[in-house]
Image (spheres, coloured by chain):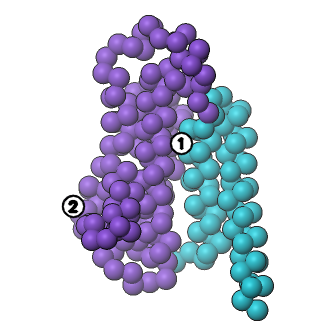
Amino acid sequence: MATPPNRIAASAGGKKDQGFVYLPLIAGWLVPGAGHFLLGKWWRGALLAASIVAMFVLGLAMKGKLYTSAGDILDLLGLVGDLGNGLLYFVSRTLGLGADQVQVTTAEYGRAFIVVAGLLNVMSAIDAHNLRTGRKQG
Amino acid sequence: MHPSHLTAVFLFALCASTVFGITMRDTPRKMLRYGIYCFTLFVGSAIVLSWVMFFIAR
């Protein structure tokens, strides 16, 4: 839940404002949970990492498709979702994981798992950014 | 891996609810409550919509 502006103002000017403010956002995107780890939120980071990595791996295990190009608008949306996984996506692409075409029934589930894992990872990274800037308390 | 549709729903709901709970609430207690709320809605809506589609198809 977003924190009201008066609480944002109250948290400004503290030790949190030192350093590169976007580091938790970028780290959280590249490695699930890393943004929260940088802020010392170990349990939250571990739970987020476990959930997102599990979802991505389950998607691959179900022979889900990894989008590699943006031929039409639906492919573009899928690619954007996949890119949300950060390094998980790039490493999987490099290793040739994921199906190119739908071959089994569960591949549709797998494709959805991979795309949603990417979108959840973006949410997680933004949450880390909000904690870093003081927009969110806790 | 070839899970049933219901198993896939449970796995999806578990992971998504965990992230929703942590990112959308401020305190651990509220996170847990919201995570359980989201999980219930994910699974419940999937079951209800499945029955709706079953009766539409008959």
SS at circle 1? helix
Query: Which residue sits at x=74%, y=85%?
Result: B56
Q: Which mark is residue A47?
A: 1
Q: Classify residue B43 by image quadrant.
A: bottom right
Nearest the viewer among A133 and A91 is A133
Query: Which residue sits at x=68%, y=51%?
Result: B38
Query: Which residue sits at x=38%, y=34%?
Result: A25
Q: Name the residue under label 2.
A: A94
Query: Which residue sits at x=34%, y=36%?
Result: A27
Residue situated furthest left in the rendering:
A94
Which chain comes out cyan in the rendered image? B
- Please state which amino acid type lies under the numbered disc 1: Leu
Image height check: is A99 above or below A127?
A: below
**Do tags 2 and 1 sit on the same chain?**
yes
Image location of residue B42, percent across then percent down = 67, 59
Q: In the rendered view of the protein, which quadrant contains the C terminus of chain B?
A: bottom right
Q: Classify residue A33 by image quadrant.
A: top left
Image location of residue B46, percent across then percent down = 69, 68
Can the viewer see residue A57? no
Please state the chain letter of the residue tagged with numbered disc 2 in the rendered image: A
Left or right for A130, reference A20: right
Indicate which disc, 2 or 1, sits on the residue closer to the N terminus. 1
Residue situated furthest bottom in the rendering:
B58
Can the viewer see residue A21? yes
Q: Classify residue A7 by image quadrant.
A: top right
- Please state which amino acid type lies under the numbered disc 2: Thr
Nearest the viewer among A28 and B48 is B48
Please state the chain letter of the residue tagged with numbered disc 1 in the rendered image: A
Q: Which mark is residue A107?
A: none
Which shade is chain A? purple
Left or right for A78, reference A93: right
Image location of residue A77, percent across then percent down = 38, 61
